[in-house]
Amino acid sequence: MGTGQLTIDLDAIAANWSALDSMSGGGTETGAVVKANGYGLGAARVARALAHAGARRFFVAHAEEGASIRNALGRGPEIYVFSGHMRGDTDMLGDLDLIPMINSIEQLTRHIEALPDAPFGIQLDTGMNRLGMEPGEWAAVRDIVVPRKPRLIMSHLASADEPESPQNQAQVTLFRELTAGCGIPRSLAATGGILLGPEYHFELTRPGIGLYGARPFTEARPVVQLDLPVVQCGVVLKGEAVGYNATWVAEVDTPTATVLGGYADGILRALTNKGSLWADGIECPILGRVSMDAITVDISGLDREPRALSLLCPEQGVDAVADVAGTIGYEILTALGPRYTRRYSGRAG
């Protein structure tokens, strides 16, 4: 099994896209975000599954990711690059027909000078203060940009996972003001924005985390299972400690299993003495520190020595692990390391 086996259900990803597409409404197109190697699951296979489901517009963080998606999908689908037109990206953007989401007047100048006939989009900052033109910058160049017919104008919601946040209404109101009468397709909603309702959908939605089975899309089908092979089993006697710095000490003789996998594989050290692995529907608590390549667990609830234990499984999804670790499902998925054997199930892709 190597370090572990990561099983990815491509049909579940496709089904999650279709469900979010239905929520987006008939007048709105649904794209797909496949950055960070398809949220850690393998961008090429994930993108092909999404294209099979019907996605035609894909979003990545930078041009190199766009090259990988173009190689996987061929020339048909549109691929948008959130980081825009960076220095050194010109040849890749032009050769691979990637669409930079322009974030500044500097990027706009670079793009028009280097690739005057190539497509582009515009990203506006409506309150996230991360990427995009500020309202004043946009006002200065809008009359230059709109006649060039950018493929898309987008912004990004900062608090979409908090439906009651007043920031959502403030951002959608500003986005409407900045884009009124432009005649260009617009996009504001990622997964959380889709769930906020039609006011946020505009002409294109671009779900990300919901495709991969995590919050805020609580109705998503689970996508991943992570199984870790057992290296050895034994018994830790009463009074003995487990792991670095002796952070767990046995109160009674305790049967244990040590699995191959650790923080080098994206299993967060924050799960130390808090997280669990699972076997046969039984929870097996982590004992001691999560180390680089190994984790020890309590298997006293099992009636046999297991060959493998699962971190991600039907009993414990991405969000459950994230809650214990004090983080979010995004980090759990994108941290999944390269040493896992990735196995794909389903017909999609």
Image (tube, grey):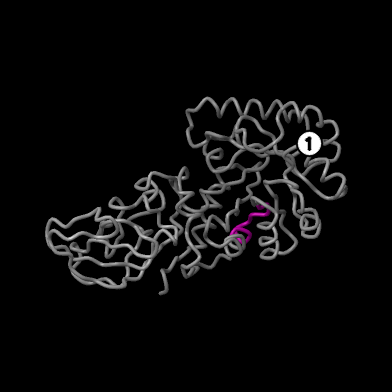
Q: Quadrant of the N terminus?
A: bottom left
Label 1 sits on what residue type? Ile
Between residue 200 and residue 109, name the one nearer to us.
109
Question: What percent of the width, then of the height, locates residue 247?
Answer: 25, 53
Q: Position of residue 288 (x, y in %)?
A: 27, 56
Quadrant for residue 34, please give it: bottom right
Which residue is under mark 1?
105
What SS does tag 1 mark? helix
Q: Is residue 57 magenta?
A: yes
Residues shaded magenta: 50-58
Asked if the magenta segment contains residue 20, the reply would be: no
Q: Is residue 234 above or below residue 193?
A: below
Q: Is residue 288 left or right of residue 47?
A: left
244 above or below 124? below
The residue positioned 20% from the left and 59% from the top of the image is 241
Closest to the observer: 318 or 61?
Answer: 61
Could you tell me residue 199's position as x and y percent? Answer: 60, 32
Q: Residues within 10 Å of mark 1 (few under 14, many from 20)?
A: some
Front-lying residue, 98 or 245: 245
Residue drawn at (40%, 57%), measured in percent from left and top?
Answer: 267
